[in-house]
Image (cartoon, helix red, strand yellow):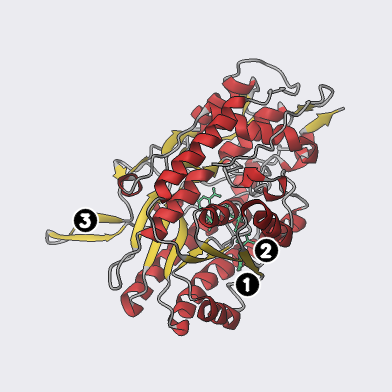
């Protein structure tokens, strides 16, 4: 196996430091009360860990059929590494993306911490590195229906992986415009995909990325099963139904609406559909994206798009106090980006048969409480943990127990929160920290008027780079 390592040690500038002031409710666990930049040396352990992941991935893919796969949203944080992974495993990959995520960066005045390259540069770099072709098609799945149908007719994919949605809960709650855009884009995209598969008369298996948030983030009161739940109806009748939907944002509501569309089109048109209820994805590079700097994955650190563990790891590496919302008592599901790609391959290799009900997997490695995750990062980096007022309308504390047995039974050995992998993210952050805009770190979207008022003291300009 050939492995090219491009992560370099970054000589951190000791004159750079951050401070935060306004809006802090309290300070929790810290191992070293300091706001100066933490210098984390490049760790050989993270290279070793990525090598280990590469070897494990070979094991998962062995003996599987090679497929033609269209990856909708293949320019995004999950879609790009998944496309490379599938290509690396020998599948024939076509990426479709309308670059809306890059446009939202422009709208928010923010950018990926990592310098992601334009799609054309990305796919030619992959060809150079791997010898493999990936086609890129710029197409809006929610609006350019005829082009989507034609593409499916031309490519005749075995599987269509659907990542192409507006995926940030905070962005979906920013204002009426972003709420309406999220519903229009996500629900139309999923409906178009089903109609296009029917109209093209290509029997493609749809693999959709849903979210653990469809179940809601209350206390589960027991293990959340994978998609369907046994119930007793009035009169003592037993039934197995789709798990009740309990969305906590407009974004999560679109995933619940998607889930109903899958149920309908499976029943009406016998479409073969798998819905993956994914946890919060963390990490940046995978054994494929690390092969060349031009392949680097996007890394969102801002209050709207930065997901919780990646935000903490970035803040820890920069010496910025961790931004924990409320008490940090929220329990969430987590999965490493490398496992996202592996789960997708397992799903495309195990499609439901025609006429079988929608297959649903919980795509998570483990559940953790946010304040415990913050403590792990704080212990490793020595930064403070700051409890901020919560911009979200949600339970302050919840328990969450989730089954992920289906993926484990199909060969996934999930990666759990591992300090060696924390080093990998830390190295990436140290390398690109000069690209960070600290005014984008604090929350910028609020679930309702009351939450906005409670967060009024948060001052984005209070997070400063000290020169
Ligand atoms: N990142 C996570 O932690 C996470 C967790 C659970 C579920 N998911 C789901 O995984 C999927 C991918 O998430 P991500 O983090 O990669 O998001 P992302 O925003 O980085 O990627 C989504 C991609 O889809 C594209 N896109 C959006 N609408 C489109 C349209 N109408 N036509 C064509 N392309 C379009 C965007 O340009 C972007 O490149 C999403 O559906 C998300 O809900 C992500």
Tell me if residue 388 can be seen: no
Mark found first going from the N terminus, 1 or 2 = 2
Q: Which mark is residue 100?
A: 2
Above or below 285: residue 100: below
Q: Is mark 1 within 8 Å of ligand 1?
A: yes
Question: In whole angstroms, how far apart are the C-alphas of marks 1 and 3?
Answer: 40 Å
The location of residue 163, given as percent across then percent down, is 54, 60
Quarter of the image holding residue 365? top left
Mark 1 Cα-neighbour bin, 10 Å: few <14, some 14–19, many ≥20: many
- Calculate the distance from the C-alpha at mark 1 to the C-alpha at mark 2: 9 Å
| Image: 316 above or below 119 | above
Q: Would you name the residue on which mark 3 appears? A: 231
Instruction: State whether residue 14 is above or below residue 445.
Output: above
Count of marks overlaid on the render: 3
* Residue 392: percent from left, percent from top: 56, 45
Report crowding for label 2: few under 14, some 14 to 19, many 20 or more residues within 10 A (C-alpha): some
- Sequence-wise, the earlier of marks 1 and 3 is 1
Quadrant of the snapshot with the C terminus: top right
Are the residues tagged 1 and 2 within 8 Å (C-beta)? yes
Q: Which mark is residue 140?
A: 1
Question: Residue at image x 71%, y 37%?
Answer: 457
């Amino acid at each position: 196996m050939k492995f090219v390592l491009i992560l370099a040690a970054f000589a951190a500038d000791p004159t750079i430091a951050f401070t935060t002031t306004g809006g802090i409710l309290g300070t929790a666990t810290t191992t070293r009360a300091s706001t100066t930049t933490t210098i984390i040396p490049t760790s050989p352990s993270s290279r070793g860990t990525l090598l280990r992941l590469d070897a494990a991935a070979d094991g998962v893919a062995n003996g599987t059929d090679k497929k033609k796969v269209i990856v909708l949203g293949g320019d995004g944080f999950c879609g790009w590494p998944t496309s490379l992974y599938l290509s690396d495993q020998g599948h024939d990959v076509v990426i479709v993306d309308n670059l809306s995520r890059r446009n939202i960066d422009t709208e928010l005045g923010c950018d990926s911490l990592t310098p992601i390259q334009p799609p054309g540069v990305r796919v030619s770099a992959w060809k150079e590195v791997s010898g493999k072709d990936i086609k890129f098609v710029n197409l809006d799945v929610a609006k350019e229906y005829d082009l989507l149908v034609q593409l499916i007719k031309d490519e005749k994919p075995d599987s269509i992986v659907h990542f192409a949605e507006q995926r940030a809960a905070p962005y979906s709650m920013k204002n009426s415009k972003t709420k309406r855009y999220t519903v229009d884009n996500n629900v139309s995209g999923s409906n178009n995909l089903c109609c296009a598969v029917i109209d093209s008369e290509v029997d493609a298996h749809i693999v959709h990325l849903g979210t653990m948030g469809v179940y809601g983030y209350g206390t589960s009161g027991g293990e959340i099963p994978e998609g369907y739940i046994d119930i007793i109806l009035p009169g003592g009748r037993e039934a197995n139904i789709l798990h009740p939907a309990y969305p906590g944002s407009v974004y999560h509501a679109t995933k619940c609406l998607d889930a109903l569309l899958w149920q309908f089109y499976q029943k009406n048109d016998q479409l073969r559909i798998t819905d993956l209820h994914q946890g919060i994805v963390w990490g940046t590079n995978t054994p494929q994206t690390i092969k060349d700097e031009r392949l680097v994955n996007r890394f969102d650190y801002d209050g709207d798009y930065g997901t919780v563990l990646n935000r903490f790891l970035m803040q820890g590496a920069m010496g910025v106090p961790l931004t924990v919302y409320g008490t940090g008592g929220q329990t969430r599901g987590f999965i490493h980006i490398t496992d996202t790609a592996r789960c997708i391959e397992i799903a495309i290799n195990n499609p439901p048969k025609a006429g079988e009900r929608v297959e649903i997997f919980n795509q998570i490695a483990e559940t953790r409480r946010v304040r415990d995750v913050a403590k792990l990062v704080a212990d490793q980096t020595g930064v403070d943990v700051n409890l901020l007022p919560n911009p979200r309308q949600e339970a302050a504390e919840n328990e969450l127990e989730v089954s992920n047995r289906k993926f484990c039974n199909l060969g996934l050995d999930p990666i759990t929160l591992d300090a060696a992998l924390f080093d990998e993210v830390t190295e990436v952050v140290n390398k690109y920290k000069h690209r960070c805009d600290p005014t984008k770190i604090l929350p910028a979207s609020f679930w309702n008027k009351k939450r906005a008022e409670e967060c009024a003291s948060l001052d984005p300009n209070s997070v400063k780079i000290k020169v």
